[in-house]
């Protein structure tokens, strides 16, 4: 008896689907982009957005809190007055923290999206999932105008998380309600060059 | 061969089930409210895109290319996933898929698994099969949880509990979770958060579906809102993903089309809160064992039908359900399948693959052919054409007279016949007019009218008018 794999592949071949016409990519590759549009679109998801020039000064808001950080955040982010929680951290430690501070890989102005890829200042995925508050630093040069532009900047084989606002659901009468399993508060610092 | 669990055992035909549903005024109220809201929001989300039509065309073409090269692309996907440390399994039907997943759970010694909402696993009846094998599957998507705790059946592909309003949800939660909760959506969401938290933190095996799989990189993509998906895809040791063989896109670039089409069409958002992408296994981050189960379950048979195969382009956005006047009146459960609404009316009977099955054969009649589904479909599936095509097949199948099935068509779903005909006329014209009023393409080109059937359905008239003329 043929294996399931062989049988399925043979049945596909037997269906003799004719070759398709070439794909016409007539849609927009890029958009207006920019810090302003990004900030506006993030705020539309009821995330908190601040446009800043000085990150350490903006991190004053974390004073008195127990905040998770990935191993490779810029040292100047580790301001005084905050209890920084460093890896290795257990699930329970992450769950019991007050929040997490990260950077990002890419952001998308059109859709107000932040993309994490586990690279610099981002850490493994659990870090930005279990704490109930996520503060994310986005540099102006990390903001791509459109979805196509953002995908081009990303390495697909890294574990990617696209974040558009705080956790939400549309499952009750099809209305968006913020705050289910992911961080219920998303705060974004958009860093303008000085 | 075992029966395909895509339809629920013992379901009445659509007309019978719908008659019962129509009497349920609460259900119709819930649905009218929910679909009305989402229709307006979808129109706004799509309206701000000046290149929406170009995206739809690209989406259609990419998916057609996938169907034309499905064998090559599946082999490529298998190679890329394997190269990154994943294990790929193939399943001809539901039974085989369920057995593979159950065996994997047993290997892991798991008697409880967490699940991310997935149409593929609902289609194959995985939860029931696991339960029978001693493995309890916990649904973690809010709507799925409402259905599971309410011992209910799904009625919508995106929001399976769309037929429940907030006070009904409150009642189910209080009864099954043993907690006091108000009927405020935020409180209900909080109750689900608390209820599931510990499960997420302790369960070792997760099962997910996939929205897309990228053949050339082996990347799997899941779109979600709540974060339950991220929990399941990140915290357990082992991840088992079950996916229909048609869920592919050829390249990473192709995702740029679908990541724009899907969120706006389904939840009417610029982007859904969370999209996760993973490729095989990543050391030190997420599950260290990854299994991908590719299921056929009627898809290759559907692929053989030159008219019907376009149903395999579907990205399960649910826009066609939300605009369908028949769905809004009868609700999803009347379709007797996890795939209700217009897409269900064309996909379910094809997956069942047997037009002698009276329930499956009645589904292509669950429509007024108004064409609204085609207009909103992000991958331009010409649902009315496929419906007409499948009706002809149903008529041909033994044991069904044309009359009995067609008279059971959707007309009676509308209380007043005149309103129905008006909706029809408006719809059948609108679907062929481009935005500027020019006719851009003719439906059902001569080549698609199968020569063996001598009653072609003329494009511009309503089904009722067509039927009146051709019934004799
Ligand atoms: S048929 Fe089209 S509109 Fe309906 S669910 Fe599928 S993709 Fe969406």
Image (cartoon, grey):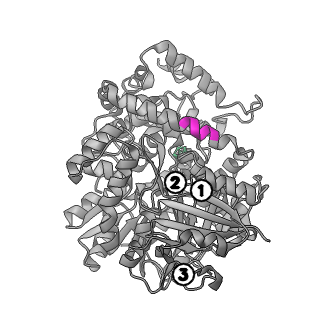
Q: Position of residue B192 (x, y in %)?
A: 33, 55
Pair 1/3: label in front: 3
Q: Which residue is mark 1?
A: A17
**Residue A70's mark?**
3
The quarter of the rendered structure image containing the N terminus of chain A is bottom left
Pair 3/2: label in front: 3
Q: Earlier in the sequence, mark 1 or mark 3?
A: 1
Left or right of B434: which side holds B263?
Answer: left
Left or right of A173: which side holds B264?
Answer: right
- Name the residue nearer the viewer: B63 or B240: B240
Q: Position of residue B231 (x, y in %)?
A: 41, 67
Chain letter of mark 1 equals A
* Magenta stretch in the rendered image: B39-44
Secondary structure of the residue carrying numbered label 2: helix
Secondary structure of the residue carrying numbered label 1: loop
Q: Is residue B165 above or below residue A105?
A: above
Left or right of B158: which side holds A42?
Answer: right
The quarter of the rendered structure image containing the C terminus of chain A is bottom right
Q: Residue at x 48, y 56 (%)?
A: B225
The 10 Å Cα crowd at callout 2, few under 14, some 14 to 19, many 20 or more, is: many
CB at mark 1 closer than 8 A to ligand 1? no
């Amino acid at each position: 008896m043929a294996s399931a794999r062989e049988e399925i592949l043979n049945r596909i071949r037997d269906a003799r689907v004719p070759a398709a016409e070439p794909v016409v990519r007539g849609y927009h590759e890029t958009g207006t982009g920019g810090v302003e549009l990004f900030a506006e679109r993030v705020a539309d998801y009821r995330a908190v957005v601040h446009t800043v020039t000085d990150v350490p000064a903006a991190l004053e808001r974390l004073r008195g809190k127990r905040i998770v950080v990935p191993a490779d955040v810029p040292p100047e982010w580790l301001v005084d007055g905050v209890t920084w929680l460093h890896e290795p951290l257990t699930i329970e430690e992450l769950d019991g923290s007050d929040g997490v501070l990260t950077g990002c890989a890419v952001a998308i102005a059109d859709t107000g999206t932040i993309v994490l890829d586990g690279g610099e200042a981002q850490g493994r995925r659990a870090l930005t999932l279990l704490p109930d508050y996520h503060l994310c630093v986005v540099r102006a040069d990390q903001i791509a105008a459109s979805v196509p532009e953002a995908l081009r900047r990303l390495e697909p084989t890294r574990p990617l998380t696209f974040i558009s606002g705080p956790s939400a659901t549309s499952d009750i009468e099809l209305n968006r309600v913020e705050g289910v399993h992911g961080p219920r508060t998303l705060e974004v610092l958009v860093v303008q060059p000085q | 061969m075992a029966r395909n669990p895509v339809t629920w055992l013992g379901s009445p035909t659509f007309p019978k089930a719908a008659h019962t549903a129509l009497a349920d005024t609460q259900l119709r109220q819930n649905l009218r409210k929910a679909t009305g809201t989402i229709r307006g929001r979808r129109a706004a989300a799509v309206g701000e895109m000046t290149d929406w039509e170009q995206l739809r065309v690209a989406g259609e073409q990419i998916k057609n290319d996938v169907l034309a090269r499905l064998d090559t692309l599946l082999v490529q996907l298998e190679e890329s996933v394997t190269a990154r440390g994943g294990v790929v399994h193939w399943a001809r039907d539901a039974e085989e898929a369920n057995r593979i997943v159950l065996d994997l759970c047993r290997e892991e010694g798991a008697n409880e698994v967490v699940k991310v909402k997935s149409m593929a696993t609902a289609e194959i009846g995985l939860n029931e099969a696991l339960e029978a094998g001693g493995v309890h599957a916990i649904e973690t998507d809010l709507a799925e949880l409402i259905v599971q705790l309410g011992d209910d059946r799904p009625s919508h592909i995106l929001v399976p509990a769309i037929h429940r309003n907030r006070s009904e949800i409150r009642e189910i939660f209080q009864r099954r979770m043993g907690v006091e909760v108000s009927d405020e959506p935020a409180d209900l969401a909080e109750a689900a958060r608390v209820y599931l938290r510990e499960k997420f933190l302790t369960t070792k095996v997760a099962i997910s579906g996939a929205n897309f799989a990228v053949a050339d990189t082996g990347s799997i993509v899941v779109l979600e809102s709540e974060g339950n998906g991220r929990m399941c895809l990140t915290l357990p040791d082992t991840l088992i993903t079950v996916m229909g063989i048609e869920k592919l896109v050829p390249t990473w670039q192709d995702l740029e089309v679908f990541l724009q089409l899907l969120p706006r069409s389904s939840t009417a958002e610029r982007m859904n809160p969370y999209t996760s992408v993973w490729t095989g296994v990543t050391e030190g981050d997420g599950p260290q064992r990854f299994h991908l189960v590719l299921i056929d379950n009627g898809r290759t048979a559907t692929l053989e039908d030159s008219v019907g195969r376009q149903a395999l382009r579907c990205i399960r956005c649910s826009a066609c359900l939300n605009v369908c006047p028949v769905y809004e009146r009868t609700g999803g459960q009347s379709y007797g399948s996890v795939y209700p609404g217009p897409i269900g009316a064309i996909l379910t009977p094809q997956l069942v693959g047997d037009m002698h099955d009276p329930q499956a054969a009645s589904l292509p009649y669950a429509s007024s052919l108004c064409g609204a589904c085609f207009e909103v479909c992000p991958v331009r599936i010409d649902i009315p054409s496929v419906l007409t095509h499948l009706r002809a097949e149903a008529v041909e199948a033994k044991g069904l007279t044309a009359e009995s099935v067609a008279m059971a068509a959707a007309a009676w779903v509308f209380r007043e016949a005149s309103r129905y005909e008006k909706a029809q006329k408006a719809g059948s014209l609108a679907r062929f007019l481009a935005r500027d009023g020019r006719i851009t393409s003719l439906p059902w080109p001569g080549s698609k009218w199968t020569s063996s059937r001598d009653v072609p359905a003329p494009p511009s008239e309503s089904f009722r008018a067509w039927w009146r003329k051709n019934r004799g």
